[in-house]
Amino acid sequence: GVSAAWMIALHEPGADPSRVYYGTDTRVQGLLLGAALAFALQGRVDRWRAGAGGRVAGAVAWAGLAGFVAFVAVAGDQAEWMYRGGFTLVAVAAALLIGGVTVAPEGSSLRTILSAPLLRATGAISYGLYLWHWPVYVWLTADRVGIDGTGLLAVRMTVTFAVAWASYVLVERPVRRASLTGLPVAVASATAACVVVVSVLALVSTPIDAVAGAVRVEADGAVVDLDEPTVVRDRPPADLDEQPVVGRDEPPVAPRLLAVPPVDPAPPGLELPPIELVPIEPGEPVRTFVVGDSAALSLVLDFDHATHGDRLEVTADVRLGCGVIVETGNPSCEGQLEAWARDVVADAPHVSLVALSRWDLFAMEVDGEPVAFGTDVFDREVERRLGRDVALLGATGARTLVMGLPCMQASAELGPLAAAQADPERVAHLNQLVETWADGRPDVSFVDVAAFTCPSGEFQERLDGVELFVDGVHFTPEGARLVWSWLVPEIERLARGF
């Protein structure tokens, strides 16, 4: 009861549910209910089965199964009611099913069905299936396996079952039988180490997804971790002889970060006096500064210098797990606006490209109160914050180009938030809101990447034979290069028109 109440207390409607969804303290309610059921049945099953309990147990089990199936069919991890008692009801339905089947007499219908050898074998390794499925699903991506859809699902399930069975035979069963000695101890230790290693590999190999971090991409393609001042990837263009920049001194712009004219109302210390931008000479590449999240990083990392380097010079400050409008609370998001202010002075871009983030599809906090996505208050605050960002990113005289969100698809690699982030209605609402806002401003343009990547209005994995996404959100190298072939002329048209 305490765990369920704690879940209700912590959950904020419309906000990122990760803390509540993953929290041991909020999800332990199911484990505790199962433990309570085990204690209740201990030593009482035969007596209850012989009495009135045996006569009603079958009906109780069927009711539990019906309830459980109903929850699976209609509930989603983004459903608000699931965090306000829904998870508790799921646990109760499972307890009714297990308790009813346990007490039901031999030969009762549901007890007979669930006693099928295949189902019993699956139940024996069920904990291993739960334990191993996540690292297996994250590791076996469409990019690595070379297939997607149903074929990829079959590969993932086969590997998950195989690993779970090995874990059961080599670790779980010996532990239960108190026979974990000698060689089995070594095997168990190795298996435990494998769990850790595979989980870490799965985490670090997830395609630039929800792992938070602040990253700076230099004009020559070098990638600098802003949390640690080191290069995390060297990406020199093929036609450059010089090595990529290893680090970057912060430009001495502190005096320029003083409040000048106020921006409605902007955080103090972030308004910059305008700088007269050097005109773009014929043949000079358009300096383009990109801000966004991990999806923007997947685009920037595969900018084709050999093809477009004479037309665009791209730098970026991207924050993994951060919105450009909605503040997610990730530590890497701290100081985002200050970093943009330094970068626009250091880079003097002709165009600042704001790539809307999937994290902008959640509720935000306004004046200390949560505001649900899509409400009038939310929409007004989006416009206010975009005005602040444009004033900041255009402080050097750059024009601002806001790129909308593409059609996205939820995938297992992206966790429980993916369904909301890939909701086409949310994506369409935010894109339309920002496009309408940009149409009313002379200093901002909007570019609709969804119209390019999904002209039908529905998510599509391929365009012109090119696989667009690694996981439904982040671009493949080939997909990124295809998007750049469309985006470069849009940026040039904007830059050379002022």
Image (tube, grey):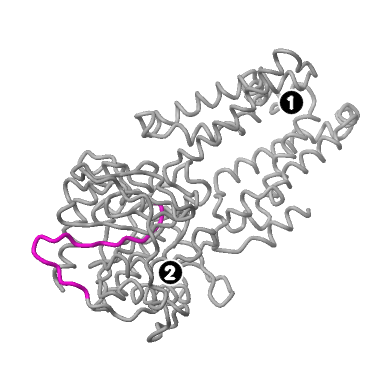
Q: Nearer the viewer, residue 364 or 184?
A: 184
Q: Quadrant of residue 274?
A: bottom left
Q: What residue would you read off at disc 1? A: 108
Are discs 1 and 2 less than 8 Å apart at CB?
A: no
Give the extent of the magenta segment. Answer: 277-294
Q: Nearer the viewer, mark 1 or mark 2?
A: 2
* Secondary structure of the residue carrying numbered label 1: loop
Q: Position of 155 compared to 428: left or right?
A: right
For residue 336, above or below residue 174: below
x and y, in percent, of residue 258 in the image: 42, 81
Magenta stretch: includes residue 37: no
* Rendered view: 63 above or below 51: below
Q: Earlier in the sequence, mark 1 or mark 2?
A: 1
Image quarter of residue 460: top left
The label number, if any, that marks residue 337 in the structure image: 2
In the image, farthest residue toward the bottom: 261
Image position of 61 with respect to 367: above or below: above
